[in-house]
């Protein structure tokens, strides 16, 4: 059994991103893009990859199809140092998922074929492997259709075994935001929604009210707000920090990279403000290249950016390992 800092349970797929789209997407016309990127996708896999590149020991539990997309995704994770020995291959014809992202003006269309992410269930999880870690992270709560009825059990068992926990729900494609999530949040130490998700989950249009609701459930609530200041709340303690300004190429996966930075620091026992500052750096750095992991694949450039930004902020030693 490997020694793990963090065990990630979640989905895995590739992202196909098309750039340079025309101003109008007209039906039944052959429209041209000026560029593309095929990168490691899915919130869980992006988080695991980038967390490992920061120096944290990461194990990954997921399910792929027996197809080239799954093979490429696993190779990308393994190259980053993620242990993928507990990833199962589906029996049958179900394929690994694929997300097509179409950046459009300041927003993007996101089209996902879920594939095996809809099939992974509780019986696919090696709980002894989960318990060998110090921390459990789960992403994409609403996409795990087969696993979702047992996610509460997963978190309960992790907490009973002494693990700390974190959750990033990501979007709900059905836009229902059902209340079963609220029971799970009682077992979550670090909850990492973005601004929109926080308000949807709390069923309010007021962010302050949403944070109050969520902070009454999870121990720490961290709200991502893009280029605006992120907010971290623990009990009655709250801090807010803006990310650094960078030349943005692509914001796909920036939130997952933010999560990785926060959890990396949290695993080292850092105070919340430093966790938030490092998360901001990780999220911002992710946007400097296409896709959610491409910037992190060059560890030397990653370390150089982090060191420069961290020192400029006067925060002391660079919190990277390995």
Image (cartoon, rainbow, N blue to C red):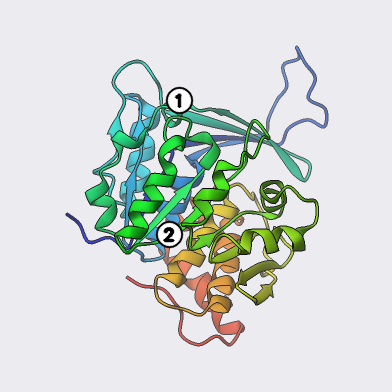
The residue identified by callout 1 is 115
**Up/down of 14 relative to 232, above or below:** above
Q: Which residue is mark 2?
A: 165
Q: Secondary structure at mark 1?
A: helix
Residue 133 spot, x, y in % from top left: 29, 59
x and y percentages locating residue 77 in the rendered image: 36, 47
Q: Is residue 35 left or right of residue 20?
A: left
Which residue occupies 71% across, 55% down?
A: 195
- Neighbor class of circle 1 (other Cα within 10 Å; few <14, some 14-19, many 20+) is many
Q: Calculate the distance from the C-alpha at mark 1 to the C-alpha at mark 2.
A: 26 Å
Tag 2, which secondary structure? strand
- Left or right, 185 with reference to 245: left
Front residue of 130/260: it is: 130
> Residue 36's image quarter?
top right
Query: Can the viewer see residue 225?
Result: no
Looking at the image, tell me whether mark 1 or mark 2 is earlier in sequence order. Answer: 1
The extreme top residue here reads: 28
| Residue 61, placed above or below residue 272 | above
The residue sitting at 44% across, 77% down in the picture is: 319
Q: Residue furthest left?
A: 1
Where is residue 110? Give x, y as percent.
64, 34
Against 148, residue 284 (above or below) is below
Is residue 261 among what the camera can see?
yes
The location of residue 87, given as percent across then percent down, is 29, 39
């Amino acid at each position: 059994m490997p020694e793990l800092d963090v065990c990630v349970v979640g989905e895995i797929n590739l992202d196909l991103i098309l750039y340079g789209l025309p101003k109008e997407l007209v039906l039944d016309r052959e429209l041209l893009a000026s560029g593309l990127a095929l990168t490691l996708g899915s919130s869980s896999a992006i988080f695991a990859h980038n967390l490992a590149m920061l120096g944290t020991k990461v194990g990954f539990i997921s399910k792929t199809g027996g197809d080239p997309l799954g093979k490429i995704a696993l190779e990308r994770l393994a190259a980053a140092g993620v242990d993928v020995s507990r990833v199962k291959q589906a029996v049958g014809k179900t394929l690994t998922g694929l997300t097509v992202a179409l950046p459009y003006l300041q927003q993007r269309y996101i089209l996902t074929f879920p594939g095996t992410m809809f099939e992974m269930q509780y019986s696919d999880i090696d709980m002894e492997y989960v318990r060998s870690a110090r921390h459990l992270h789960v992403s994409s709560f609403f996409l795990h259709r087969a696993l979702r009825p047992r996610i509460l059990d997963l978190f309960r068992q992790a907490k009973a075994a002494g693990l700390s926990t974190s959750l990033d729900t990501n979007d709900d494609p059905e836009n229902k935001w059902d209340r079963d999530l609220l029971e799970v949040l009682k077992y979550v130490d670090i909850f990492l929604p973005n601004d929109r998700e926080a308000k949807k989950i709390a069923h309010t249009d007021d962010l302050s009210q949403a944070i109050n609701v969520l902070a009454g459930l999870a121990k720490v609530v961290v709200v991502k707000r893009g280029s605006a200041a992120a907010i971290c709340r623990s009990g009655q303690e709250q801090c807010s920090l803006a990310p650094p300004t960078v030349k943005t190429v692509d914001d796909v996966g920036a939130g997952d990279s933010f999560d990785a930075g926060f959890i990396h620091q949290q695993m080292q026992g850092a105070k919340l403000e430093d966790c938030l500052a490092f998360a901001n750096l990780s999220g911002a750095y992710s946007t400097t290249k296409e896709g959610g992991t491409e910037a992190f694949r060059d560890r030397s450039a990653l370390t150089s950016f982090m060191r420069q930004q961290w020192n400029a902020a006067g925060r002391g030693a660079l919190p990277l390992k390995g």
